[in-house]
């Protein structure tokens, strides 16, 4: 059972839906069916949603693999929390007019740090389990 992954995925889904509704709302407001129509706020919202969609799936796959390989709950939930924090900080930074680059960078540091940590854990945990 993937209990921890399910909780993390549910939280990330809520964030993704919120980002998607922001894009939809700005498309309606600006009467833009495709692209950003030259509206900076819509462009920022599109990229916040797109960037989220680009990085979250691999994180969730790695979290699920870790949980399936029998890692303890805390070793699964901590990177999940870090991924959520990173994605929230990045989305907030990209949506601030003008974009807050320090928040975006911090959000990406959390995200990349989490993905790298998950990759290492997904190699290390099974090896540790086999030896222990």
Image (tube, rainbow, N blue to C red):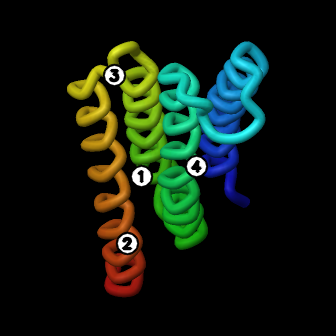
Q: Which residue sits at x=41%, y=47%?
A: 79
Where's the N terminus, which quadrant?
bottom right
Q: Is residue 113 left or right of residue 34?
A: left
Counting residues from the start of the chain, the first of labels 4 and 1 encountered is: 4
**Which residue is labeled 4 in the image?**
53
**Label 2, label 1: how far apart the Cα atoms are:** 10 Å
Disc tally is 4
Q: Which residue is mark 3?
A: 99
Q: Are marks 2 and 1 in contact (CB under 8 Å)?
A: yes
Q: Which residue is mark 1?
A: 75
Figure check: 129 above or below 82: below
Residue visible at 68% across and 57% down in the picture: 2
- If you read the primary sequence from the N terminus, does the residue marked by circle 2 or circle 1 appear first? 1
* Mark 3 nearby-residue class (10 Å; few <14, some 14–19, many ≥20): some
The x, y position of residue 14, in whole percent, is 69, 30
Q: CA distance from mark 4 to mark 1?
A: 24 Å
Tell me, yes or no, whether the two marked residues, 3 and 1, touch with CB atoms within 8 Å. no
First along the sequence among labels 3 and 1: 1
């Amino acid at each position: 059972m993937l209990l921890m992954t399910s909780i993390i995925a549910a939280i990330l889904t809520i964030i993704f839906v919120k980002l998607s509704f922001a894009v939809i709302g700005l498309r309606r407001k600006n009467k833009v069916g495709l692209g950003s129509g030259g509206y900076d706020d819509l462009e920022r919202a599109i990229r916040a949603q797109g960037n989220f969609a680009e990085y979250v799936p691999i994180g969730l796959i790695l979290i699920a693999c870790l949980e399936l390989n029998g890692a303890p709950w805390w070793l699964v939930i901590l990177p999940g929390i870090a991924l959520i924090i990173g994605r929230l900080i990045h989305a907030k930074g990209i949506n601030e007019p003008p974009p807050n680059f320090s928040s975006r960078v911090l959000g990406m540091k959390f995200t990349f740090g989490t993905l790298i940590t998950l990759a290492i854990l997904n190699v290390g945990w099974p090896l540790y389990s086999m030896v222990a």
